Image: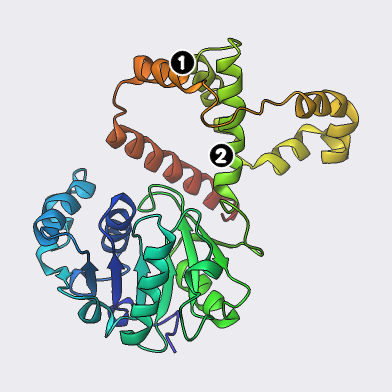
Amino acid sequence: MLDSTRKDTETRITLIGTGTIGLSFAALYLASHLASPSQLTIYDTRTDVAEYVQESLPKFFEDEESSSLPSFAEVKIAKSLEEAVEHASIVQESGPENAPFKINLWAEVEKYAPKDALLWSSTSGIPASQQNCKMQDTSRVLVVHPYNPPHIMPLLELVPSPETSGEVIKRTHEFWRARGRVPIHIKKETTGFVANRLAFALLREAVYLVDQGVVSVEELDQIVQTSMGPRWAVAGPFKSYHAGGGPDGLEGFFKNIGGTVQDCWADSGTPKVGDGWEEKVFRDAKEAYGTVDVAERDRITRRLLQVLEEEKSKTGSAW
């Protein structure tokens, strides 16, 4: 059994898939010293995977001092799935969002990986209960869904199938907590899990308001950035509105403006993908932002999280 408190020097991590999420996880493991480069194995079916990884992975560390950079050349590039997983403590797939791919992948991984290896999927929507359907032991696979980009964002949603072993959930939770991340055990499989459901609910209303001519794409973003964005970085919606209710908390909040809340819920937009709003909203987003500077986004996000952590440490609060 993999001990979640074992030294990081004893943990061998295999990452399957070198897309945005897979490489971001590689950067997380290396930057946070969750694994030395020699303990990190990457497997991908693309023919130029070694060259691609050596070219792309250092870009996650462009703001770092050269003396503190990991040795990217020591990251192992496996030539086969068997080679990639045969000695792994953790196997984490970040492959295509394609159910047949993941179903077949786990059936193959099960043949070669150690019996005690943790098997994690980074999927944003395909449940573990679907991914494990060709496995002999359906209790092993656990969705570990990050919030993009995982090398910066602390959240990891742990979404088990009904068959996932409680021990697998426990070990995974302890692994990430011991390493400073924020794993949340999602108790039931639900479409999109939790973080994306919340984000997409806001996106749906944003699309509706822009499509109805109430506000522009850029103005809506400014509203979020100068109101709920900063507030929710400090406290989520329940805590925020509990504070907004004064001495009576959340109950007081609903007593005060519950009618307005209900009116907004009743009047909420219900646009559907393909209804025709796309041309206007996509055009306005492109005109407002062009190509977004992701590096700037990541730099500011990292600094924001650092400030929050510094402030929470003063009061002994935790994520």
Corner quadrant of residue 245: top right
- Where is 263 relative to 165, above or below? above
Q: Is residue 250 left or right of residue 76?
A: right
Corner quadrant of residue 213: top right
Name the residue beneath numbered marker 1. Answer: 280
Give the residue at the far top of this rendering.
Answer: 213
User: How far apart are labels 2 and 1 at the CA level?
Assistant: 21 Å
Viewer-side residue, 225 vs 276: 276
Residue 90: x and y in percent read 36, 76
Residue 177 visible (yes or no): no
Q: Amino acid at mark 1?
A: Lys
Q: At numbered mark 1, what does the secondary structure look like: helix, strand or loop? A: helix
How packed is label 2: few (under 14 Cα within 10 Å), some, or many (20 or more)? Answer: few
Residue 9: x and y in percent read 28, 79
Q: Amino acid at mark 2?
A: Ala
Q: Count every numbered label the image shows and give the total.
A: 2
Q: Is residue 159 left or right of residue 181?
A: right
- Where is 70 relative to 172, above or below? above
